[in-house]
Every structure is written in structure tokens, then in C-alpha cells.
Image (spheres, rainbow, N blue to C red):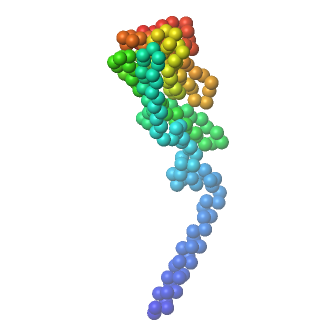
Amino acid sequence: MTMNKFTVLILGIIITLISCDARDRINRTPKEILKEKNLLESFSERVSYFPQEYSEVKTDTILSNGYHVNVKTFTDMESSYLKQFKHDSINYKYHYRDFKAEIVARHNSIIFHDVIDKQYVLKYDKTVSYYMETSILKSVWVNQEEGLNQNKLVLNILFTQPKTNAEKVFELVIDNKGDKKLINLTDLNQNYLTA
């Protein structure tokens, strides 16, 4: 009797294996099979983040005209510009993370403490909103030569559109009382914008 149960079990396994020969899939495309298993999107989509991880750069500058500036540029992990395209039936999604720059400027006491990002520029220059939608903050630096010439603090702010040569440069001029002006150097016809 044990032999009969064993024979029936073996026979059942053989029948199961024979019936799973995938003949039903022979006439279907790989795309149809992946779609049936809900795997098509994971194979047809590539998502990338630039940069992949948080980064931060700090600079500390003391100018001979009495200004002391701390600039902390860091990755905004919550905000990014999404560039999508399709190539060889694969959907590519590139997320270019935004950057921000925290600026603390002193001239005997703190005269400026703010975060420079797209919103800061848009607060004073709405004409560049079309550009800011597809750009990221690339860099903020102290323009020492211009600052010494004007006897003020001069910061240059660079925005760029990823994978293009389109750039916009702004200049933030701060005097020793904390009064400031934002200048769109790329579109000089905008003149001075009081910040």
C-alpha cells in the first residue's frame, strides 16, 4: 500500500511538471509576458538622481574691506527638476536635485542672513520664472575684485539648465548697512532689482 501511495505521488509530480511546459507563452511577446506579471514598468523605466546623495560645501571668506562671509551650499533633497525622455522603449526619468546656499555676511555685525535659491531670485525678478522652472542653482561665490572696487560685498549666483549650456548669472550687492540689490547679469536690460 505504501508503494501505491508513492507511485501516485511520483505520477502526480510528473503530470504537474509536464503540464507546466509554457506552451501558452510561446506565441506571446516578452513585453506581453512582463505586462501580465506587472513587471513591464520596472524593466521599461530608469530613474536616476543627480546628485545621488546629500552634499555640502562651506566657505569662509574675509575681505580686506571688512566683510566676513560664510557660504554653505547644500543639496535640497526634497526638490528637483525632472527631465523625462524615451529611448528604445525605455522611459528615462532624471531628477536633478536643487541646491541652496545659506549666506551669513558680517560687517562688524550681521548684515545679511538668508538662503539663496530659485524662490529668492523669483521674489525679486519674476521675468526669469520660465527659466527657473528647468534650472538648478549651480554655484554661489564671493566676487572679491568687484567687492573691493565697490567697497561692498558682491556675491555671484549661477543657475544652469542641466545638460544644456543655458546659464543665468545674478549679482547680489550688499552694503555695510545690509541694503542689497540683485542684478541679472545675463539679461542686463533688466537693470537693478532691489532685493
Residue 171 x, y percent position in the rendering: 50, 15
Quarter of the picture holding the C terminus: top left
Relative depth, front residue between 20 and 63: 63
The image position of residue 27, as x and y in percent, is 65, 57
Question: In percent of the image, x 62 and y 24: which residue is there?
Answer: 165
Report whether residue 35 is seen.
no
Above or below, 98 against 124 in this view is below
* Residue found at the very far left of the displayed protein: 109
Q: Is residue 87 above or below residue 65?
A: below
Residue at the far front in the pictured view: 64
In the rendered view, tell whether residue 101 sits above or below residue 146.
below
Q: Is residue 64 visible?
A: yes
- Tell me which residue sits at (47%, 10%) in the image: 151
Comparing 56 with 68, the one in front is 68
Q: Is residue 75 above or below residue 195?
A: below
**Residue at figure coordinates x 62%, y 64% from the top left:** 23
Nearer-the-camera pick, 128 or 91 = 128
In the rendered picture of this protein, how many numbered marks are placed on residues?
0
Q: Percent x, y for residue 9?
A: 50, 82
Quadrant where the N terminus is found in the figure: bottom left
User: At 56% from the left edge and 34% from the top edge, which residue is drawn?
Assistant: 84
| Rendered location of residue 153, percent (x, y) | 45, 15
Q: Quarter of the image holding residue 169?
A: top right
Q: Is residue 138 left or right of residue 27?
A: left
